[in-house]
Amino acid sequence: MTTSVTLHMVDAEPRIHDLELARRLAYARAARIRDLIRRHADELARYGALPIVEKPSDAMGGRPTGEFFLNEGQAIRIATLLDTVETANVCEMVVTAYAEHRRTQTAVPAPTPDFASILSILHQMATTLAHLTKHLVQR
């Protein structure tokens, strides 16, 4: 394995751009991967939302296109559907990139909660209960 795939944050979720996946898979016509994604959209939806980013025509003209950003499961499924000589390497790259992303996300310590305000509320509740029960007569 040479390098990792690039993850893009889309709706606060790491995703792989469809054309990068196609290039890594050595797919002859990279943009044709979008046809494959569209054909298998229902199956890919099992792995989560399948966001499409509309890309308008550029300065040189051309038609507007929709770019797909795939999550881990979707990227691996598309790679296995294409079944190129690079599929195994690309699947390893995808898994490694997502594992590294998860590792960096969990490496950040969670913020310490402010227990002082919680203790203050509990103290107020205990004081109120003590005051209310002080005047109760046992039967």
Image (cartoon, rainbow, N blue to C red):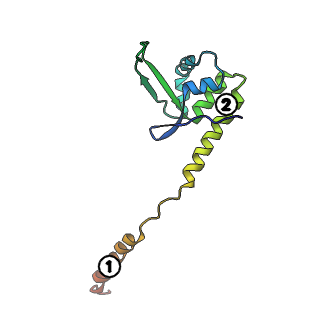
Earlier sequence position, callout 1 versus callout 2? 2
The image shows residue 41 at horizontal and vertical percentages of 52, 24
Please name the residue that numbered disc 1 is placed on: 129
Q: Is residue 124 above or below residue 41?
A: below
x and y, in percent, of residue 61 in the image:
41, 12
Q: Quadrant of residue 120?
A: bottom left
Percent x, y of residue 114? 41, 67
Q: For mark 2, what is the residue?
A: 90
Q: Is residue 123 above or below residue 40?
A: below
Position of the N terminus by quadrant: top right
- Specify whether 11 is left or right of 98: left
- Determine whether the residue tagged by mark 2 lies in a helix, strand or loop: helix
Which of the two residues, 95 or 20, is positioned nearer the viewer here? Answer: 20
Q: Is residue 86 above or below residue 11?
A: above
**Cβ–Cβ under 8 Å for marks 1 and 2:** no
Residue 81, image x, y percentages:
64, 23
- Which residue corresponds to the image point at 64% horizontal and 26% vertical from the top-left? 24
In front: label 1 or label 2: 2
The amino acid type of the residue labelled 2 equals: Val
Left or right, 26 with respect to 139, comes to right
**Left or right: where does residue 78 sit relative to residue 114?**
right
Residue 5 sits in quarter: top right
SS label for mark 1? helix
Query: Viewer-proximal residue, 10 or 138?
Result: 10
Q: Residues within 10 Å of mark 1 (few under 14, many from 20)?
A: few
What is the spatial separation of the Cα atoms under label 1 and label 2, in whole angstroms?
Answer: 63 Å
Question: Above or below — where is 133 with respect to 29?
Answer: below
Quarter-wise, where is residue 117 in the image?
Answer: bottom left
Amino acid type, callout 1: Leu
Disc assigned to residue 16: none
